[in-house]
Structure formats: C-alpha cells, structure tokens
Image: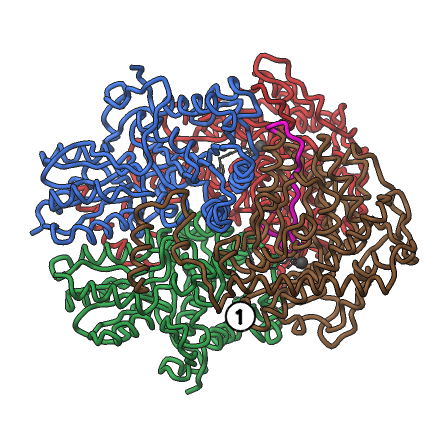
Chain colours: A brown, B red, C blue, D green
Amino acid sequence: MPRRSRLHIPQHHSRPGEEPDFSYLETSPAGAVARPDVNARVRDIGNLSVDLVRVLDDNHVAVGQWNPHLEVQDLQIGLRHMLLTRIFDERMQRAQRQGKTSFYMRCLGEEAVSVAQGMALRPKDMLFPAYRNQGLYVVRGRPLVDLMCQLLSNTRDMCKGRQLPVMYHWAEGRIFSISGNLTTQFPQAVGWAMAAAIKGEDDIAVSWIGEGSSAEADFHHAMLFASVYMAPVILNIVNNQWAISTFQGFAGGEQRSFAARGPGYGMAGIRVDGNDFLAVHAVTQWAAERARTGAGPTLIEHVTYRGAAHSTSDDPARYRPKDDYEKWPLGDPVSRLKNHLIALGEWSEVRHQALARELEVHVTESWKEAVQYGTLTDGPRLNRDLMFQDVFKEMPEQLRKQREQLRTEQGV
Amino acid sequence: MPRRSRLHIPQHHSRPGEEPDFSYLETSPAGAVARPDVNARVRDIGNLSVDLVRVLDDNHVAVGQWNPHLEVQDLQIGLRHMLLTRIFDERMQRAQRQGKTSFYMRCLGEEAVSVAQGMALRPKDMLFPAYRNQGLYVVRGRPLVDLMCQLLSNTRDMCKGRQLPVMYHWAEGRIFSISGNLTTQFPQAVGWAMAAAIKGEDDIAVSWIGEGSSAEADFHHAMLFASVYMAPVILNIVNNQWAISTFQGFAGGEQRSFAARGPGYGMAGIRVDGNDFLAVHAVTQWAAERARTGAGPTLIEHVTYRGAAHSTSDDPARYRPKDDYEKWPLGDPVSRLKNHLIALGEWSEVRHQALARELEVHVTESWKEAVQYGTLTDGPRLNRDLMFQDVFKEMPEQLRKQREQLRTEQGV
Amino acid sequence: MPQMNMIQALNSAMDIMLARDPNVVMLGEDIGYFGGVFRVTDGLQRKYGEHRVLDTPIAEGAIVGAAIGMGVNGLRPVAEVQFADYIYPACDQIFSELARLRYRSAGDFWAPVTIRTPCGGGIRGGQTHSQSPEGIFTHVCGIKVVMPSTPYDAKGLLIASIEDDDPVVFFEPKRLYNGPFDGDANKPAVPWSTHPKGEVPEGYYTVPIGKAEIVRKGSAVTMVAYGTMIYVCEAAAKALGIDAEIIDVRSMVPLDTDTICTSVRKTGRCLIAHEATRFSGFGAELSATIQEECFWDLEAPIGRVAGWDTPYPHAFEWEYFPGPLRVAAALKAVMEAA
Amino acid sequence: MPQMNMIQALNSAMDIMLARDPNVVMLGEDIGYFGGVFRVTDGLQRKYGEHRVLDTPIAEGAIVGAAIGMGVNGLRPVAEVQFADYIYPACDQIFSELARLRYRSAGDFWAPVTIRTPCGGGIRGGQTHSQSPEGIFTHVCGIKVVMPSTPYDAKGLLIASIEDDDPVVFFEPKRLYNGPFDGDANKPAVPWSTHPKGEVPEGYYTVPIGKAEIVRKGSAVTMVAYGTMIYVCEAAAKALGIDAEIIDVRSMVPLDTDTICTSVRKTGRCLIAHEATRFSGFGAELSATIQEECFWDLEAPIGRVAGWDTPYPHAFEWEYFPGPLRVAAALKAVMEAA
Ligand SMILES: Cc1ncc(C[n+]2csc(CCOP(=O)(O)OP(=O)(O)O)c2C)c(N)n1
Ligand SMILES: Cc1ncc(C[n+]2csc(CCOP(=O)(O)OP(=O)(O)O)c2C)c(N)n1
Ligand SMILES: [Mg+2]
Ligand SMILES: [Mg+2]
C-alpha cells in the first residue's frame, strides 16, 4: 500500500524455507546468575528477570549457586517422568490421527517445565495448569488410563464427556480443571492462594500459561492481586516462543522479557532455561519457599520451545521452518538430563533404551485398557442423561423436562 | 476472627483522627534526575520509573536537566489556566450544592497535570481524558459556557442530555468523549495512535487514568498493544493517592511505583512530581518527542494528591484525616508555580489577586449565560425526541415507534 | 419486628452469614473500611476484620476471578460489583468460568460465589449508573439470577444465595434501597417503614431461590415484574382501578413458571414489565414461556412494557423510566385488546 | 458465476474492501501471516501488507478497544475474534463503548467497527468452540447483529457491515464454512457447489442489513431461523412433508419484523429455531414480537426449538445439537396443536 506506515510490526526471525535464526535469544552462561535469599526485596533482584538462570553447562555438569543438588534417584525419576510424558504424547497423537479421539496437544520440548516443577512442589500445593502441562499428571501419579479415558470421552471419562480432549482435572490430586479459555485460571490460582492465606494454611497455588496467553486481561488481574495481597502463589509463563502461528514478539517479548513484568508489578520475576531440569527445579523451590514463608509471589518465565505443532488441528509448516526445533539453542530437556546423568555415571544409553521400551509397553497396555471403556466413535458410550447434570448442583425442572424431551426424541 | 490469616492487606498510612503520615512517599531532590536522550533504550532508563523527576526546588527555582526553560509568558498562561480551572471547579461544586446540577468532580491539587501536559502537546494531538482532566478543556480554549451547559444537561449541552455532568467531549478540539466506565479510553487511545502510525501521520494520542483505574484490564491492554506496535502514544497514570476510599496501595502502589509498569512491558516509564508544572511539562515534551519520532510509547506516573472529595457524592472524612491535603509533601501546584514566577520577578501577590478576581468574574458571567439555556430542574429543556437519536446513525423503525409511544404517553 | 430499609436488610444478611460461617468472605471496591458507596457493607470490616471483608483493586474481572479461586479453596465469597453497569469486565470469568466450572469438571470443582450488584435507574446516574443487565445473565446456563423488591426478600434471598452451592448473581434495585418507589418522582419519598415487608427479622431466615411471589391477588390480568417495577405496576393498576394479580418474579433463574402460568391461565391476560431495554430483555423470555404454556387461555396478546431501546439518558431520566403512565397505557392496551 | 464456499466468499468480501478503501484494516489473532485458523483471511496480508492486516496479541478486549480507537481515527477496522466463545473478554469494550459511543457523544464520535467471529457447533469443538452467544448481543442497543447462512449472503452482508457506520457483530456459522449442513452428521458432507447461493459474484455487491429472506415459500407454517438451522428446518419440513415457509432472519438487529410477521399472519403457525441455549435466547425475542404482532392470527402456540440449557458437551454433540429429529418433533407439535 502506498502509505508510509510508521507502525512497528514485530518481525519473525525466520519463515518457512529460511534458516532458523535464534540470534534474538539472550542467554547467560550456566552458573552465571547468583541465587539471592528467598526473602530478597524485589527491587534488589531485578537482574533475575533479565538474565537466564541455568545450571547444566555444555559439558552436562551442574554448576553455580542455583544447582539444587538433587539426589541421583530424583534425577532418574525426573528423567522417567519426562520420557513417559513424551511417549504418551506420541502415542496419543497417533490415536488422534487414527480417528480415535477428536483432538490432541503435545508438549514436546517442554517436558522439563511440568515435571521439574511438579517434583519441586508439595503434594498439597494446588495446581492450575494450562493445556500443555500433562507432565503434572505424570508426576502426581494419575494412571495414564484415566487420562486416556478423558481423551476418548468414554464411559470412564473424568469429565463425563463434557470436555475437549486434554482438558483434564483431578480433585484429589489437586489439579484444577482446564478451561478452553486462555488465562482464566491465572487469577483463580491467585484467589485460591489468597484463600489459603486467609485460612492461615501453608499450601501454595501454582499456575501456568503460555507466553501468548499472557496478553489476556487475566494475566494482569493475576499479577495485580498477587502483588497487592502478596498471595502465596507461583505464576508461570511458559515461553515456548509460539502462540499458534504468532511468535513471542506479538505477546510483547520483543521489547523485554516476560519475567520483567514481575518487577513491574512489584513482584519477583525469574527468567529460567526451561529446558534445564535442574534450573527449573531450583527456581521453583526458591519461589515456593518465598511464597510459603509469606515473602510474596513470583513470576517465572520458562524459556523453552514448542517442538511440535500447536495441536492436531495445526500445521506449523505454514509459518515456521521445518527444522527449527533441532536448531533451538537450549537443546532438548530429555537429552540434557539424560546426558547429565550419564556424565554423573548414573545412566547409560542402554538403560535409556530399556526405559523407553518399558514405558512404551506401559502406554500401550494402558491404551488397550482405556479403549475397552469406549472411544469417541465406538461404544460403550456414556449415558446421554449425563448431559443435563452438573449445570446446577440440583437439576432444575426445566432441565429435567429437556432430558425427557431428548429421551423421547431418541426413542429411548 | 480466630484464624491466623497470612494474607497481606495494604495499610493506609493515616485514618480519620490521626496525623497525616506521608513517610511512605519516596522522592528525589529537584534537579537530581538526569534527562536521557528521547531515543534512549528502555533498559537504560529504568531509573526514571523509580526516581521522581522534579524541577522546582524549595526556593522556587527551576533546576536540573529537566528544566524546560519555558518563556515567562507561557508560565503566566499556565498559572492562569490552573487558576481558572480551580475557580471553575469551586463554582461548579457550589452549583451542585445548590441543586443546579446532579453531580460534580473537582481536580483540586491536580491542576498541573492537565494544564502543563495540555500545553506541552500540539493542538492536533488527540486527547483521551479521564473525568478529572478539565484543565485540558481550559488549555484548548473551550468556552466555559459550553462546559457548564454540559453540566446542566441543558439545551446547549454538547452531549444532548445523555451524559452525567463532567463527561464532556469536543471533536474539533480533539478531546475524546469520557465514558463512565474506568480505563476504557486507554486502549482506545492506543488504537487511535496505531491508526495515526498506519496512516503515516505524526499526531500522537495521549490518555489519562487514575492510579485506581490502572487495576482494570484495559490498562494491561493498552500497555501491551502500545509496546508491541510501539504506538505513538503517551499513557498517563495520575496517582493522586486515592480511588474513592482506597489509597494507592490497593492499586499496587505499595510494592512498586506505577511508572515501573512501563519497563515491565518494555516501555519507557517516568515518575514525575505531578504538582511541579515545569517537571510535568518537561517529561511530557520528552515523551511526545519520543512518540512522534517513532521511538515508542511512554508511561508517565504523576505523583500528586486528590485535594478534594472524590465527587460531590463522596465524604472523605470517613476514610482520611481532614487536613491531609495541607500536609502533602509535594505542595500545591498553583502556589508552586506562582512562587516560581514571583521568584523570577514576573509575578506578585497583587497581580495574583487581580487575576483571581478577573477569573471569578469570567466564571460568574459564563454561569449566568449558561443557566439561560436551562438547568436540570428549570427550562428550557432539550427536546425529548433526542433521546432516540444517535443510538444508530439512522433511526431504526423500532426506535421510531418508541419515540411515537413516548409522545403519546406524554400527551404531546 | 425491627424495621429495616433494604440497605440494612442486606447488611444484616451479610452480618449473619459472616458470623455463622467462617468461610464466608466479602470482597469488592470500597466495601471494607468505607463500607461501600451505598453503605451496604457498613461496619462489617470493623466487626469481622480486614481478612474477611476485603477492599480490592478496581478490577471487576479480577474480583470475580479471585472469588472463583477462593470458592474452589473452600471459602464462600460474596463479591460486590459497585454498579451493575461495571459488571461487563467480569463477563468472561462469569460466563466461561463461574457458570461452567461444575459442569466441565463433572461436579468435582465448583465455586459458591455470590455476586451482588446494584442495578436500575431513578437516581440521576446517567447511562453508566442506571443499567439493568439482568437479561444477559439469564441466558447463561449455570448461574442463578435473582432480584428482590423488598427488605424482607432482600435479606432472605441474600442469605439463601450465600448458602447456595451454585453461583448467584444478585441484583439490588438501588432505587429501592431507601423505600418503595412507584415511578412518580414528584411524589415525596416513601420510607420502608410504611411497607409490611419493611419488617425484617433480626436473625437468620431464608427466602428460597426459585419461587415467585404473588404480591397482589387479582382476577382481571396478571402483571409480571420484579424490582422497582413491582411498585410501578401496583400504582398503574390502582390508577386504572383494575383488579390485577401482580407477581414478583424474584428469581429469574430458576424461573417459577408454575406460579406465573397458573395466574395467567386464571386471568387470561398478561402484562410484563421491566426497566431494562425491551429488545431481547428478560421480558422476552417471560412472554415466550407464558405464550407457550398458556396460549389457549390467553384472551389478548401478552404485553411488554420496558425501558426504551436506548441508553439511559441523564436529562431524560423520567421520560426513559417505564413509569406509571407508560405501564398504565400498556395495561389498558392489554385489557382492551379483543 | 464463480462457485465459492463461505470461507472464500468472506475472504473475497474482505479482499474487495481492502482494495476499495484504504481505511479498511483487519486485525486479530493469527489472521495475518497464517491467514486465520479457518483460513478466512488467507492471502490478505500477503496482498495488502502487514500494516493493513495485523496479527495481534491474544487479547480480545484489547483487539476491540484498539479497533474502536482506530475507528475514531478514520479507519474502518474489521476485527476477528477467533471463536465466538472467546468474545467475552471484549464484552465491556463492546457493550459500554462500541455500542454507546455515538450516543453518548451526541453523534460527534463513532467507530465503524465490524467484529467477525465464527460461532455454532457441529465441529467436535466441545464447550468452548461451539457456542452461539448472539442473543446476548441483541440485547445491547447500539450494535447491529447479523449472521449469514450462505456464501452469497456472507459476502454481501460482510461488505455491507464493513461499509456500515454503525458497529456490527458478524457471526459466521462455522459448520457452514464448507457446505450447507442439515444436522444429520451421518450423511456425507455436501459442498456449496450444490447450492444456488454457492454462486457468488467476483466483484462488489451488498446484501442489506436489516432484511430477512424467505428461503422457501410455503403456506402451512412459518419457520424462523438463521445460520445452520436454516438447513435443519428445510430437512425437517421435507421429512414431514409440510409446506413450510422458511425465513432466514439474517439480521437480528435491526430485525425485519415485517417479513416475519407478514408470513406468520398468513400461515397462522410458527416455529422458531436456533442452536443457542433456549432460555432467554434470541428465540424468546422472536417469539415475543411475533406473538405481540400476530396474536389474532395464531392458530397454535409459537414453538421454540433450540440447544439445551447446558454447555455444549463434547461427547454428546449430536444429542445436543437441535437436529432434524428435534426440529421435526417441534414442528409436528406446532402443526398438531389445536
Ligand atoms: C480467550 C481465548 N482466545 C483465543 C483462544 C484460541 N487459542 C487457543 S491456544 C492459542 C495460542 C496460545 O498460545 P500460548 O499461550 O503461547 O500457549 P502454547 O500453545 O504455546 O502453549 C489460541 C490463540 C482461546 N483458547 N481462548
Ligand atoms: C469499571 C468501573 N468500575 C468502577 C467504577 C466506580 N468508580 C468510579 S471512580 C472510581 C475510583 C477511581 O479512582 P482513580 O482511578 O484513582 O481516579 P481518581 O478518582 O482518583 O481521579 C471508582 C471505583 C467505574 N466508574 N467503572
Ligand atoms: Mg506459546
Ligand atoms: Mg486516584
């Protein structure tokens, strides 16, 4: 168009057919960032929101003050959880392709976020996840069959057929229901944390959104209430660089890190290498202790990469280079933890292969069980009467009538 | 209550019957803050959002790099505008007490914000004010009679009787319509500025909200869009310490300055002494030039004090000490500019009194004229048919019928 | 029995619930130290502490969002939205979250939030302090919607709402705070002490959600209304000397179709009145339902009388408000149709 | 004439308007480089540049807020909300600002914003990708509300909406993007090339806002519907062999009462159908208006058939959707009532 527009448009760094270009990414060397006291004043730790907390160095060694010094066993459990998450994802993606479910979303490349964080928290801490946090269910031990039944909307679906696949919840496991609407869980987590504080309980709330979702009003709502009441909450932005087709610059990441929003609201902000299991674990522990001791909330930005498509409905080849994930400078979280364990002499390729096979069998067995309870297309199916329940605690007359009408309509 | 709540509740510094306590206020000495280049990178000027830009020192002398070196004549005009605003406010407050209007809102103590900013901008810059920016109308020369007619909802009301008093607008004067809903104008201003940039025009948009209003979602919307597209806009937060009954801590001001939100979003943020005419003028000029040259938006926090009640419906004696305004550490904007002019040898108490009398006469004369066009209670009144216009550009059949129905109902 | 105006009755309901249930908390703009811009929460923070009665930032969406989280964590939050005109920033949290949480989680999560908000015109509030948006909320499945018209009902319904495990949007017709109002702004104000339902028990009681009330028995026509319009309907029927049966809907969701339709079947005529704009207002649902249920008994078209389909203009408050003249004209039309 | 599906028709409308009027701009999530998740804006950014077709952050409220400011500054913005289920964060900017700006400023300011958003179910979208919230918007005075049911109307109405100086919320029934759909999910998909209104002129034309269309002439009953339900109504009438007159509302605000009521006066019977939840849905307004206008001609109660008053459940999509069975049952009831 002829007009000389002066509007700034965020620029993607590479497009289909181009070389992936990650030169925009600002990082810090592993071990370079100091770990302040958990009670540090926000104004004294502004650097945490700009630097990048990293523990694993290029030689797979854990270095610096943020090293959480985890037991080898915990590292192995973490690796197992991440690998299981990945294998589960692959299998469910295939199931969708086979028409067994309507929809799926993988977290390829982001496994460390949910797994390391899940492990750094206490079982009674309340989790308000987004749709790409399946690792939390793995850490907290929800049987895969249960997750699969949700994906299948079958007779054992925890959501009774009401939700799109991946929108799990687990009351006893203290994992909140996932909404289809982005970011709504963020202020809810803050409210939950406020309630814990009001009641004098020391459980904390933790919530996750994508960097794209941080554009929604509820991001601001959560930040503000967390800051004003110093709510015991950890707010996570998983910056996987993409929101469907738009890169993180369209969410405000071009000018400044997302973690920097924290100090802007008078809240601690930490930018962490989201593919570094140890770093994610360490900052989560720090933030959890800060919250639990009444020193206030923390915003954590996880710098990571969305390895797969946005969802099974998406085709990333339309908007980014095919091989970009392989070029991501922060590597792959599973390989990095694996290599760290190998460097420690506590793991090997052989053991890794064996573990992978074991987990694959576990996933396959679970799937076999799950489909017995029905799939979206084949029976057994949930009773359609369930459609009218839980709109209200007690079914009002009007819904009772509609239920009858449906029964008549379907000739039951 | 027996429970040991750990929730942090922001604490007011002084309550009715107590001594006003402003020890929480962080200030900088006049002249202490350096003035960076208008193209400075956000990350290099973080201090501007924490320090306090001040020009007038305790001896009424203008000092430091932010001194805008205004002509004496402009200073005198500024003083006149501020004084007129104040006298207008007092008279309109009385009119409300006399039952001539339903409602009024004064800006006592905040006159410098609108007047100095209005003067630092260009006539074609588009203004999106809140309800306490009447000074903008004074600067841009809207006849007081017109404002009064709006307050009276009379036959010459620019709003045709549709708006609560003080919700003015002025298309030719480039001042946008005031909504009753807080903060909605903030993202609209950004959109206006984006349009200017898209069209390649170099007018900028400027908007104002109170610190209390910065809690609304639209604050975040505005910040984000301004930052992402580097829109040519100035976003102002007038921190007059109060939002009806809650002090600025409830809007997030306890942990951090409001200006600090700017850098959090990758945007310049400046904290300025809002009662210092020169400082407000200077930072506005800086931000306007920054916006106009494509270097991006600026968030300005004006640290000031709401001298009067929130509105004529409010009773501040219920929630703050009676004499708090007199104790406000940053003084009164009118006196400070007056004293500066006196110190310059360009003003005197005698001239000030004469000016005040002249402006009082002007206000009184304007009022006499305005009430001829009707008051809320006495005629002449607007034609009630107007109620049905402007819902849509063309009146649909349905409203035509309702208009007829009203005519019948009222026996016309 | 003590006399209370509607403000006192609402305050008493909250006082009782804060005392009875340690999980009840209040939150909203200016509701704490100050006691609310209409003084409905006056004294509650002083009595129960600032951890039970919370002043909040000015962010209606955040207030509801946080209240949901609190509700999920076992509290029973009562959120105030300062004016119903300012409830829209909270629409997403109300429609997408509060209303759907129980459903989408198959009953495993739910948030017993009550949202109180003053609505309606007649106080010179102009277009942003006069709205009646209740109709919008009635279309969203999963939330209950109520509006009392007397101090007695206000207290009983508010206690019932707070105790209800479903979310409730509780509209307070602010023109009724200080007395019944029949739409004639020229008459002197009438205090609640003149009204039988200005008598309000000190203690705990509930008025069940989901039940309409016949406030005047009659045989010639059924007038269906709620909030301020109850009194306008009474005045209009009286002025015309028509033996109207007047029904106070009170609960829009769930709707007491039985009480309403039984009456219309009896009278054969019906006029519906509300202050909200007419087009797609709650009156439309009332009319549609009544028509479906009572078609064969109707002797005349069901009438609707409402606010005009324009914003509420400051200068024309009484020309806008569906006052006794407009209601009487509509009533006459319903009576004379044949 | 070229064949277009609804996606192509909408794309063509925007293409034409971007070319005709330099002030037309588009903004929304994923609409630019990517071309939209339903590909409705495909190719437009490539053709008109990233300053005319803007990718935005994920913030529906901000998108509408910014669009208003753009509109005030002389542009003619077309904002996309990715799914109608996600329009609620923008409610305040739509209800309080976009709808009221012209009124409150006495005509001095206004913003000619069009908000496009895909609505309705039938694509296995579950409760947050299937909603039909149009009824809510029809209650807000000051915005026009339209929904096309064919590619031809989609293009003509979208051009008319963009050119309209009033704000328009433009609902796109997404199940119709690729072909007419009569509610029977077991039948093979039907492409638009089989439908006469799949023929769409290449160039500029408008379909006026505010005019309903009689899509089938008939004498036994009037079926009033819009969007996907048009085809379900056709199928149901055909299945029952009933000579129904079927009216596509197209424009909910302003509503073409004349066309609808003329038909009902002729047929004496009426069934209203929509996909949205029934209670307080737009069907209520249709029913109330028709009843008021046509009472004396009605031979049976006006019927309503709609989505159940529950969220749209993923597993029960076809039990939820008001398909041919439900519509036929309702139609039968309307025909047999006596
Ligand atoms: C309120 C709302 N708007 C839009 C959408 C559509 N949508 C679903 S996911 C998505 C992208 C989210 O990106 P991000 O937050 O970065 O999360 P990621 O998918 O990268 O994990 C969009 C736009 C939605 N679900 N809700
Ligand atoms: C959306 C919305 N919520 C609440 C209100 C009621 N209200 C009007 S002014 C006000 C206080 C605003 O305080 P602040 O932003 O600090 O501005 P100030 O009055 O101090 O200039 C409130 C809560 C409103 N007008 N709009
Ligand atoms: Mg992302
Ligand atoms: Mg203030």
Q: Residue at x 24, y 57 (%)?
A: D287
> Is A366 rendered above or below residue B32?
below
Graded by Cα atoms within 10 Å as few (under 14), some (14 to 19) or many (20 or more), the crowding at tag 1 reads some
Q: Which residues are magenta?
A: A198-220
Instruction: Pinpoint residue A85: horizontal percent, then vertical percent.
Output: 70, 59
Q: Is residue A404 left or right of residue A272?
A: left
Give the amino acid type for the residue marked by disc 1 in the picture: Phe
- Queried on whether the Cβ of the residue with tag 1 lies below 8 angstroms from ligand 1, the answer reads no
Q: Is residue B137 visible?
A: no
Quarter of the rendering containing residue A250: bottom right
Instruction: Pinpoint residue B391: horizontal percent, then vertical percent.
Output: 36, 52
Q: Is residue B251 left or right of residue B58?
A: left
Q: Residue at x 57, y 44 (%)?
A: A171
The residue singled out by tag 1 in the image is D38
Q: Residue at x 56, y 36 (%)?
A: C73
Whether A235 is among the magenta residues is: no
Quarter of the rendering occupied by the N terminus of chain C: top left
Chain for disc number 1: D
Foreground residue among B38 and B8: B8
